[in-house]
Amino acid sequence: MSFPGRKKRPARVLFAAILFIVFYFLLFPYPLGKELVAHPRWAVAIPAAGAAAGAAAQALTATVASVPAPAAPASPAAGPAVSSWQLGDQFGFVQEDGTLLYTGRAPYRVALSSSGFVSYTRLGTDWILQDRTGRLVAAFTVSGYPLLSPDGGRVFSVKTDLSGLSELDRGGEVLWDRDFPTLITSISVEQDLALVGLLNGTLVLLDRSGAPVLEHAPGGSRVAVIAGDAASPDGSRIAAVCGIDPQYLVVLRRTDTGYQPESRERLPTAFRREVRMGFSPDSRWVFLEGAHGPGVYDPARRSMSWLNLPGPLAAAASARFGKVAAFASLDPGGVTLALEPPGGIAVGREYFSARQVFLGSIGGQLLAGWDGTLARIDVEEL
Amino acid sequence: MARRSRARRRALAALTALAFACAARAAALDWPVAARVITGTFGEDRGDHFHNGIDIGGGSQPVHPVLDGEVVFRYDDGSDYTSLPRGLGSFIVLRHDPHIRTLYAHLQAGSLGPVRDRYAANDRIGVIGETGHANGPHLHFAVFDEEAGSTINPLEFLPPVPDHQAPVIRRLYARVGDRLVPLDNGSILKPGKTSIVADTYDLREDVAFRWPLAPLSATISLDGREVSRISFDSLQVEGGHMVAGAAGLTREQVWDPGELLICGTLDLKPGDSALRLSVRDLAGNEAVRAVSITVSP
């Protein structure tokens, strides 16, 4: 059938177009990204979790039914990577092969690091530092509450009125002590740095000796406050969520002349509480809590991407040595776990019924906990 | 230099405090709770810090803002995320003018209610509790002057409560080396620098038993001349350490272990002297202890 006035397209034009397309893809091939898949490596029930584990945990555990049981208990002395975990008042240490090294319950709270912990009471002044097997390492008599650096190499005492911070040596002696003119709202410790956010909107960066190497008030908001801060693992960057009306994310980068502002991003939020935030292990990305899910920010490119999650951000970590970000939100119905390479295509999203959630990293992969279960989730290329 | 900076900050703090007090009176500033039971006062020794506010007991009563205010920061103990241990338990900080902020701490977990941006003076913030580092239910109430970098004695602003009792001076001591030597009429001391230490405290108005509170000020005079004065009207940070009042003294310089007040250090010269310690509370009640001492080489 043909329509009057319409010319027939010559067949050779069509043939040339097809030929062009074929050659185009032959000459300029675009490699497809390798698909990432997440699969549970092992799952282990946390002892003495009791009924709290419940059917919800069992249901999710059932989804990883094919997961092999963890290896038999072994000496923690050398080799396998170890991570701490915490679910409510229960905490402990687990090896990358699923061996639980220690499981405890905090009488009030616990200060955790990758190498040990201080489990303390609400009013007590005596702390015991224990290693990841529960062995006693040091004792302290202090008026404040304990805070450990991520690797456990540094022990801090936070004054109970949030007016100051001190560092202690293993003998319990105060190495340095520093007071602030207003409340501490957030703290981030990485290696030799301690980044302190204050109620008055000032960021104070303390060096190993407790001396301030930076006092920075980002300003620009009607109400000054630091609502969250993070120091990057390599110390090259520090970041903070600051101010109300408007609220900003500010990132400072270390230069030869000290830390200098690198970027400042206006946020659509107005948090009046501490915001969960941190850096990726490679110090390239900042993640932060948003109103409807976490944001992932690349300070070098000044680009922010937001993820939508159904509840408040409850945990964040990374897998594949920081190449994949993991976020968990908690709502009354359960937990949403989302895996996403920053700037890439989402690996996956899982919703399951649970009342608690924990995320951490172990051996470069993801350690997840919910109610009475711990699981290692590996993210691998297909 | 530090002294000038301190004086400038104190002047700034005083001006802001005055402005806040005037504004507060005009807006009918009121106590944050109905039962005004003061169980802890500003400047007390809390082990590793000065007490930077007042404690108000009276059981589990509702807490209201002292003025209309905007929420700057809040923490609901056990629910909200935190990167550090918070001994204040559940708390809220309100902003009343660009620089003045008030803190309401140790509130019952979960009593803060839904997240909101503002509170009117008659709104309920929460309920007195004992979350965080608290010995029994009480409200820790503090006032920050963010421009001056000072924490101000809240009793300077709040409507006065009846206080008919003068502070108590139980004993007066001279610190000689590691020893505390009681000072009485006729005590003999050696010349040189000597710290005068007092077992002194203010009294709770509502209880008959001994419940010591820090007084507002202590002044030492020697032969009729004021030589030392400690005042708990404000706290500020100097050289990375919290210091009290105009004298700019650290906690270790003010409080001797055992809740004894280090009233000052005298440079004693040989001869007879009249030593007088005056301790005052915020209501203006005064306790005085005068002793005659002999300084002999």
Image (cartoon, helix red, strand yellow):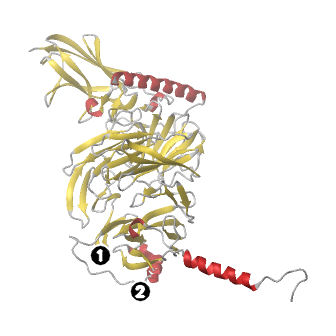
Quarter of the rendering occupied by the C terminus of chain A: bottom left
SS at mark 1 in the image: loop
Q: Which residue shows up at 37% across the image and 21% down it?
A: B4
Q: Which residue shows up at 48% across the image and 76% down it?
A: A34
Residue B232 location in percent, x, y?
37, 28
Q: Residue furthest bottom?
A: A1
Which of the two residues, A54 or A228, is positioned nearer the viewer here? A228
The image's mark for residue B286 is none
Q: Does residue A324 appear to the left or right of B253 in the view shown?
A: right
Residue B37 location in percent, x, y?
44, 37
Q: Which residue is mark 2?
A: A66
Which of the two residues, A215 or A341, is positioned nearer the viewer here? A341
Task: Name the residue type under label 1.
Answer: Thr
Q: Which residue is mark 1?
A: A99
Residue B174 location in percent, x, y?
18, 24
Q: Quadrant of residue A367?
A: bottom left
Q: Does residue A168 appear to the left or right of B75 in the view shown?
A: left
Q: Quadrant of residue A317?
A: bottom left
Which of the two residues, A260 or B14, is positioned nearer the viewer here? A260
Q: Is residue A37 visible?
A: yes
Task: Name the residue type under label 2.
Answer: Ser
